[in-house]
Amino acid sequence: MAKWMVAAKKADFNQIAEKYRITLVLARILRNRDVIGDREIQKFLYGGIKDLYDPLLMKDMEQAAEIVHNKISEGKAIRIIGDYDVDGICATHILLTAIRALGGRVDTDIPHRIKDGYGLNESLIQRAGDEGIDTIITCDNGIAALSQINLAKKMGMTVVVTDHHEVPFEEKAGERSYLIPEADAVVDPKQPGCEYPYKQICGAVVAAKLAQVLFEQNHLADRDKEKYSAVMEEILTFEALATVCDVMELRDENRIIGKKGLALMNRTSNYGLKALLMVNGLEDKALSPYHAGFVIGPCINATGRLDTAKRALQLFEAGDWKEAVTIAGDLKSLNESRKQMTEEGVQEAIELVEKSPVTDRVLVVYLPECHESLAGIIAGRIREKYGRPTFVLTKGEEGVKGSGRSIEAYHMYEEISKCKELFTRFGGHKMAAGLSLPDEESAETFRRRVNENCSLTEEDFEEIVHIDVPMPLVCADRNFIKELSLLEPFGVGNSKPLFARKGISLLSGRRIGKNRNVGKFQIADENNIRYEMIYFGDLDKFEVFLNERFGSAVVERLYAQGLPAGQMEISMAYYPDLNSYGGRESVQIVMQHYC
């Protein structure tokens, strides 16, 4: 059972509530998220575009923009090389949109996940040279491509790197030496000496910062305000999509980008994005990080996994509605195939973990027949089930490839760096990593080494439920629920507030949904006020809990005829929501945890 912890951070909640005209509960939630001081509170609640950081604070940004500006002016052939995930595709589209708006000669290339692997490789460089490209701009990759960039330089090309990944390093005698590629300009907020105040931005945001500086240098806003406004709106929409899909924390400026960009998404003039919303039934809906991360994003990612990511870029470059709808439909179908293949891979991985006598703290699962593009998704699902850092390895065209997904206490990139001599390629950041091994024998060596190096304790694996406020259900009225919208968008780094209450009576229950895996209950609080409660978690596990505590006969009566208040009482961690059905709106309690 998880450990429940109630936040107990101190502040003058009365003063905060009065100054910002919010409830004491909301003031407490802000403090729980370490939003402290007038400037930060104001930015969190009401922040706008003006609160985003100056791009020129990024190391090499001015130099990068000057290079690109000059290449545009000289009519040189520029090639943007992105990556095959949502962030890479959005970053590529952003820079393509910006350079085209400034009249540059520009095209794109995106590596094929299986043929090329992640990021820059020699064949992409060679192809660019053969085709007369003068300047390469990387986006969402490049920081680890030392040898590939050296090749481009030897071939006489100019190279500008824009990336957000961790900088490779060597460690000797406890000291780190960072390996920066010898490009003409390197823009990555995580590189040493970069004074940009917020490091946790995605590749598309770094690309957008470069676009912004290019526009300012070219005085686009002064020359054509309407064009400038339209381009910046499109860029912001794609920044928001990438930020959510690359699982960046929705804190600081990411929060502003996510909030403003998602609000603009349904007004997009981009045929491709509009078509993708339509085929997924999202047109005219208020879009949330859920829609971006779990509906739109997977359709884009599916092309890079099962086809070529260039197809997704073609969607965003579509010149008419008919073409856009055709491609969007293809992407949705590809994603349906990806879902089925993923489920099969997850089940196979679970069987292997359950059969294995090894009790590793870091799980390494080898699925040789699994499509290598699905390794990261499957690793994420296994990580969620077992609460442990997980790597899923697959048999590649050459050797073994793998992806990892981590837990908060395990910095995945730094941990695999401890055995980097095993890899032919690797990269990543705190919560995710990718790697290539020379052969199948190396897979077992890798499993052993990452576990030998692992310093995780049992406490690191213990699930902790962080309660914002122990709050009576009666406080969760319509006005309070609407006030909570000030904290949106919710996602990684800014989770929905969680409240708790003891002595909640279950009065009746039923299973709903296509698979009958959602629980809908009528409950009563300590004052016998009744509410509708819904539970989207593991309903079978919840019923086992109820059977063990109250007996199967009582549980049967709960579902069959109902129970009187007080007979079946639980403690509940919850958040309140408004449920709209048949034109009517009602308060609904969403249970997250129980004990």
Image: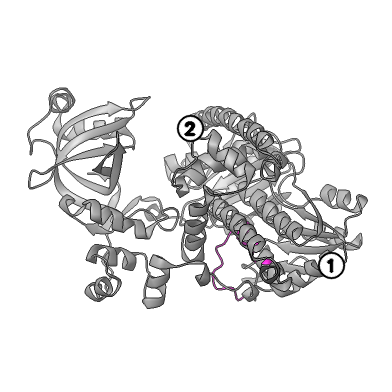
- Answer left or right for 493 relative to 302: left
Label 1 sits on a secondary structure element that is helix
Residue 487 located left or right of residue 161: left
- In the image, residue 492 lies at what x, y percent? 45, 54
Which residue is drawn at the image coordinates 8% and 35% (left, top)?
A: 567
Coordinates of residue 575 in the picture (x, y in percent): 28, 49
Choose between 36 and 223: the one closer to the eye: 223
Report the span colored magenta. 195-210
- Disc 1 or 2, which lies upstream in sequence? 1
| Count of picture labels | 2
Query: What secondary structure is found at the residue carrying circle 2?
Result: helix
Q: Quadrant of the C terminus?
A: top left
As measured in the structure, the alpha-carbon distance from the residue carrying label 1 to the one carrying label 2 is 56 Å
Image quadrant containing the N terminus: top left
Q: Are marks 1 and 2 in contact (CB under 8 Å)?
A: no
The numbered disc on residue 73 is 1
Residue 279, percent from left and from top: 55, 33
Q: For the residue marked with disc 2, what is the amino acid?
A: Ile
What amino acid is labelled 1 in the image?
Answer: Ser
Classify 10 Å Cα crowding around label 1: few (below 14), some (14-19), many (20 and above).
Answer: few
Q: Nearer the viewer, residue 512 or 443?
A: 512
Per the rendering, the mark at residue 350 is 2
- Residue placed at 29% from the left, 45% from the top? 578
Residue 198 painted magenta: yes
Q: Is residue 418 visible?
A: no
